Image: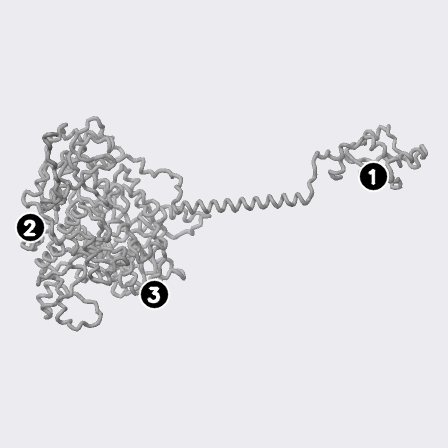
């Protein structure tokens, strides 16, 4: 029975009139079996088929003519009860098909719209067009800031009596930070507080000048050998409560720990603190200056105008040339013959150094004595000292400030003049737009670009390079474009080492090359730092060296250096439990069970798997004995080929974004990625042997990697000696040292790399508070405060001179001040950029004072 058979408007009488004649309407059974819900079609199933359907009255006619008694006995039919149908209307099939088609289309359209919206949102997030939802703040943001970095020279105490604010043991009672000020018997008037006398650093008992004095001819700033550079000065002790270095060690490297430097003693000799009229920089003349005049007690102020640092370095070397091996004549690149070659050879000069008309100039291409070296001369040469180039990277559009100038002056004076010409300082400058400045096409354009962009006193130090030059030198490198098409492999970001390699190729007169940066500052004496770092690296044994290189050293957690060495050995050989191996051996884990967690110590060169990737390996150093038999002897007394200031970590498995930016190797056929090492910040010392291997391997085998990974990778694969120097680093917050150690050395088997939990990569934010990292926020702030500038409305002249008794000293902005100029122990700081110092008005611009009018 369909829905259409039900008609609620049909009369019930009509249904009764169509009953057969043999029905007894008054029968009780009929009433029990009757069901008003069925219609004509149900009844016709068992009705008499001979009845006529022609009219509605045909049955009434048959009733009137039939016999009263039925022919056959009546049969009682049982009619099944059917559920009452709902009152609804059945739609046509055509309409239903349209509805289904529309609903399906709507669902498909909705799915496509959602997919499209998700794609657009992800693209916008990747391009930075919409802000990501704020994530939970890192743990270290809950640690309080340390305050005693900002103490001054009026609150100095001997290092042995200073109670450092940090680090402290867990069971120690909290410190009342006002006690650091109250213990010095300070007075509200800053002038009533005593100020100790500063001293010359060259006379400091633990300096390189007293520990290992050298005999050489003194170097001067002028040709008459009259003008000296005043020595930098220091104060004994530290500001009361000054924190200890959380990483690295002063004692280990022999650096001075019990003294500190303030800005006038550090930069006063180089033009800070006196006017341009007197030959200074015209900055630092006001503010807290008590005791600054001691800088010029014995050596007068230097008039720095008109200096030529290239000429000064030449004269210093010539005065001490006997200390070093004889230099080979400059090799002129072959470009055919010159008809007057024999006469003009003496006039050929290096493009990166100005012409020196002096007959003793090392730029002179003639060889005065071509006789063979005698036996006595050979003995002298074998004992001669190596020479080192300090190459400072810069670019032609760099805006030079007064603070940059006094920093470069200090670096040249303290490395070149104080060492007797053992170091030379160069500027390796990138020309960003060589299309607008075709320096390779015209020597006049080359010189003009130098004069237009570099301060006059440094113009003779410049060597230009461009990206197109590197592209022509190192052709055929397969570019992975790991940072997109805007940062090619020959560019300054990913191909920086190419310029350094080519510079070393052009300058065979050096044995070592320090790669330095414009945004590095050292609070201390540069020669003291470089010489002690180089000497310490020279004495390091090779056994366990790569394993120690891969770890931060925290003395408060790791103990002595010997304890740290043994810890690194045990962790390497036995392994540790970490996030990369915690599920190993558990049933159902994806990783296969391993025989052991330890790693094989690195002993000798670590070659790529494919022998075709080996390059000039015949002259690589090999171990003298087996690893087990060596008694920490191999490598002692050997100069390091590679010296870094950050750990050299294994990028394999880390989240570091440039871990796979290495090209030219065969990584197919199951070879995998080649063995490699990386270190953050390119500042480092490289030997000529290492740089020439990098140069030739890039040129001939087309191997190359990211600048922070390429030197360490070549040193690892060729077995060269590489050393990470654990120099002192400070942190801005009160990190629990145990947590800090686990955070930093959280890679594979207690190292910094080799695992996704490495601190290098997505967890680099934990290093922002250190004084040495590529994006440190603490280093530039500390340096600016040390120079007397305000940072975040803290510090400045008023803070140094005035005591605010309303403050409680519990935080940086609650310090009372009045302790004088900040005084910092020797430390490396990076990055320090765009330091704007207040500069005096140029005295050449006379200010016209209008006469007063008496009638006014």
Q: Nearer the viewer, mark 1 or mark 2?
A: 2
User: Which residue bears the numbered disc 1?
Assistant: 44
- The residue lying toward the viewer, choosing from 621 and 469, is 469
Determine whether label 3 and label 1 are within 8 Å by CB: no
Secondary element at tag 1: helix
In this rendering, is residue 564 above or below 712? above
Residue 202: percent from the left, percent from the top?
9, 47
Residue 168: percent from the left, percent from the top?
24, 36
Q: Residue at x 23, y 34 (%)?
A: 794
- The residue lying toward the viewer, choosing from 9 and 425, is 9
Q: Earlier in the sequence, mark 3 or mark 2?
A: 2
- Alpha carbons under labels 1 and 2: distance apart: 134 Å
Secondary element at tag 2: loop
Q: What numbered label is drawn on residue 460?
A: none
Q: What numbered label is drawn on residue 227?
A: 2
- Alpha carbons under labels 3 and 1: distance apart: 97 Å
User: Which residue bears the numbered disc 3?
Assistant: 612
Q: Nearer the viewer, mark 3 or mark 2?
A: 2
Q: Quadrant of residue 1?
A: top right
Secondary element at tag 3: helix
Q: Which quarter shows the C terminus? A: top left
């Amino acid at each position: 029975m369909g829905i259409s058979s039900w008609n609620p408007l049909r009369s019930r009488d009509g249904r009764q009139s169509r009953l057969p004649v043999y029905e007894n309407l008054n029968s009780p059974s009929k009433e029990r079996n009757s069901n008003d819900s069925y219609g004509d079609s149900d009844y016709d199933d068992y009705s008499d088929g001979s009845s006529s359907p022609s009219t509605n009255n045909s049955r009434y006619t048959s009733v009137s003519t039939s016999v009263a008694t039925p022919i056959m006995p009546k049969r009682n039919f049982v009619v099944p009860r059917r559920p009452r149908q709902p009152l609804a209307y059945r739609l046509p099939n055509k309409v239903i098909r349209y509805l289904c088609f529309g609903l399906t289309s709507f669902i498909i359209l909705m799915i496509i719209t959602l997919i499209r919206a998700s794609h657009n949102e992800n693209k916008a997030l990747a391009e930075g067009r919409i802000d990501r939802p704020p994530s939970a703040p890192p743990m270290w943001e809950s640690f309080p800031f340390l305050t005693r970095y900002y103490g001054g020279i009026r609150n100095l105490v001997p290092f042995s009596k200073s109670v450092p604010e940090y680090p402290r043991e867990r069971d120690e009672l909290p410190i009342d930070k006002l006690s650091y000020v109250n213990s010095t018997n300070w007075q509200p008037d800053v002038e009533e507080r005593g100020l100790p006398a500063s001293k010359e650093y060259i006379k400091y008992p633990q300096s390189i000048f007293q520990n290992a004095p050298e005999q050489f001819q003194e170097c001067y700033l002028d040709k008459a050998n009259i003008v000296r550079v005043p020595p930098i000065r220091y104060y004994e002790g530290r500001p009361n409560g000054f924190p200890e270095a959380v990483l690295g060690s002063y004692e280990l490297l022999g650096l001075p720990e019990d003294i500190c430097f303030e800005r006038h003693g550090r930069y006063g000799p180089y033009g800070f603190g006196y006017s341009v009229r007197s030959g200074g920089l015209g900055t630092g003349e006001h503010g807290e200056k008590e005791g600054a005049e001691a800088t010029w007690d014995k050596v007068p102020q230097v008039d720095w105008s008109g200096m030529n640092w290239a000429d000064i370095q030449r004269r210093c070397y010539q005065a001490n040339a006997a200390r070093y091996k004889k230099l080979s004549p400059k090799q002129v690149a072959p470009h055919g013959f010159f008809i007057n070659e024999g006469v003009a050879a003496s006039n050929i000069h290096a493009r990166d150094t100005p012409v020196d008309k002096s007959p003793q100039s090392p730029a002179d291409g003639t060889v005065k004595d071509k006789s063979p070296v005698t036996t006595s001369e050979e003995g002298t040469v074998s004992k001669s000292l190596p020479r080192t180039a300090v190459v400072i990277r810069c670019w032609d559009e760099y805006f030079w400030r007064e603070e940059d100038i006094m920093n470069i002056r200090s670096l040249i004076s303290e490395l070149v003049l104080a060492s007797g010409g053992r170091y030379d300082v160069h500027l390796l400058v990138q020309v960003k737009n060589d299309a607008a400045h075709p320096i390779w096409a015209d020597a006049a354009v080359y010189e003009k670009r130098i004069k237009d962009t570099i301060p006059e006193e440094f113009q003779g130090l410049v060597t230009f390079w461009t990206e197109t030059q590197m592209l022509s030198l190192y052709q055929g490198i397969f570019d992975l474009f790991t940072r997109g098409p805007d940062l090619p492999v020959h560019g300054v970001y990913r191909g920086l080492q190419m310029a350094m390699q080519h510079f070393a190729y052009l300058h065979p007169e050096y044995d070592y090359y320090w790669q330095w940066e414009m945004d590095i500052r050292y609070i201390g004496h540069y020669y003291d730092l470089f010489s002690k770092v180089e000497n310490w690296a020279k004495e390091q044994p090779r056994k366990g060296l790569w394993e120690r290189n891969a770890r931060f050293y925290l003395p408060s957690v790791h103990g002595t250096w010997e304890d740290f060495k043994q810890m690194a050995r045990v962790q390497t050989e036995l392994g540790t439990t970490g996030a990369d191996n915690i599920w190993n051996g558990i049933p159902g884990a994806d990783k296969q069970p391993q025989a052991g967690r330890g790693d094989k110590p690195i002993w000798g060169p670590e070659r790529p798997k494919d022998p075709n990737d080996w390059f000039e390996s015949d002259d690589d150093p090999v171990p003298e004995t087996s690893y087990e038999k060596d008694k920490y002897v191999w490598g002692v007394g050997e100069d390091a080929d590679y010296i870094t200031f950050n750990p050299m970590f294994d990028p394999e498995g880390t989240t570091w974004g440039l871990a796979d930016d290495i090209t030219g190797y065969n990584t197919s056929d199951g070879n995998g990625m080649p063995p490699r090492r990386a270190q953050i910040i390119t500042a480092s010392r490289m030997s000529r042997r290492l740089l020439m291997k990098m140069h030739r391997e890039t040129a001939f085998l087309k191997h190359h990697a990211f600048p922070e990974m390429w030197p360490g990778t070549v040193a690892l694969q060729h077995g060269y000696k590489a050393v990470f120097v654990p120099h002192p680093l400070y942190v801005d917050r009160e990190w629990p040292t145990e947590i800090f150690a686990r955070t930093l050395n959280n890679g594979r088997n207690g190292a910094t790399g080799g695992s996704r939990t490495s601190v290098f990569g997505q967890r680099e934010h934990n290093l922002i508070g250190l004084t040495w990292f590529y994006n440190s926020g603490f280093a530039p702030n500390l340096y600016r405060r040390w120079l007397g500038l305000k940072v975040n409305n803290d510090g400045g002249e008023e803070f140094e001179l005035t005591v605010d008794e309303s403050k409680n000293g519990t935080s940086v902005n609650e310090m009372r001040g009045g302790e004088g100029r900040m005084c910092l122990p020797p430390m490396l700081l990076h990055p320090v950029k765009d330091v704007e110092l207040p500069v005096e008005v140029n005295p050449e611009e006379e200010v016209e004072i209008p006469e007063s009018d008496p009638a006014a």
